[in-house]
Amino acid sequence: MKIVNQKNIPPTEDACGKLQELYSSDNLSLSYSVVTDSSKSHKHLKIEEVYYVIKGKAKLKIGDEIFSIEKGDIFSIPKNEYHNIQDVEETIEVVVVTNPKFDLNDLIY
């Protein structure tokens, strides 16, 4: 067992903003992401994502549908579906679980 503290993980830039990968195994990843502006529309061929919004308010586009999201919302993004966060009213902070684990090579713009 390994205990990790978020403050010790440097953020990296990804399609959605700043991302900290908090945990990763062969089957899944757990990340913390901060989105301050609209993210780039993208999809993953192999990865399904589940987001838990812990702070903020924005719009989420999945395919052709647009949803309002805010603190407390949980939503899933199926693999092979273009998506992005847009119209950020308040900086969005989310916990993201991916299955299988996050892989930058599976990111398609």
Image: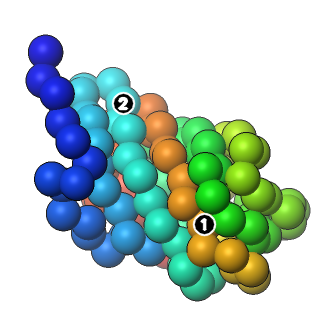
Tell me the residue at 75%/71% (across/down). 58
Residue 84 visible to the viewer: no
CA distance for labels 1 and 2: 22 Å
Q: x, y percentage for residue 91?
A: 60, 74
Give the residue type that dot 2 points to.
Answer: Leu
Residue 98 visible to the viewer: yes
- Side of 19 where 86 appears, left or right: right
Q: x, y percentage for residue 32?
A: 41, 52
Q: In the rendered image of this protein, does residue 11 appear above or below residue 47?
A: below
Residue behind mark 1: 92
Quadrant assignment for the N terminus: top left
- Side of 108 where 20 appears, left or right: left
Tell me the residue at 49%/54% (across/down). 44
Q: Residue furthest top?
A: 1
User: Of helix, strand and loop, which one carries label 2?
Assistant: loop
Label 1 Cα crowd, 10 Å radius (few <14 / some 14-19 / many 20+) = many
CB atoms of marks 1 and 2 within 8 Å: no
User: Of helix, strand and loop, which one carries label 1?
Assistant: strand
Between 70 and 15, the residue placed more toward the observer is: 70
Q: x, y percentage for residue 61?
A: 76, 66
Label 2 Cα crowd, 10 Å radius (few <14 / some 14-19 / many 20+) = some
- Side of 44 where 89 appears, left or right: right
Q: x, y percentage for residue 2?
A: 12, 23
Which mark, residue 55?
none
- Side of 82 where 94 appears, left or right: left
Q: In the rendered image of this protein, does residue 88 appear above or below residue 96?
A: below
The mark closer to the camera, 1 or 2, is 1
Q: Earlier in the sequence, mark 1 or mark 2?
A: 2
Tell me the residue at 78%/59% (across/down). 69
Between 77 and 32, the residue placed more toward the observer is: 32
Give the residue type that dot 1 points to.
Answer: Ile
Residue behind mark 2: 28
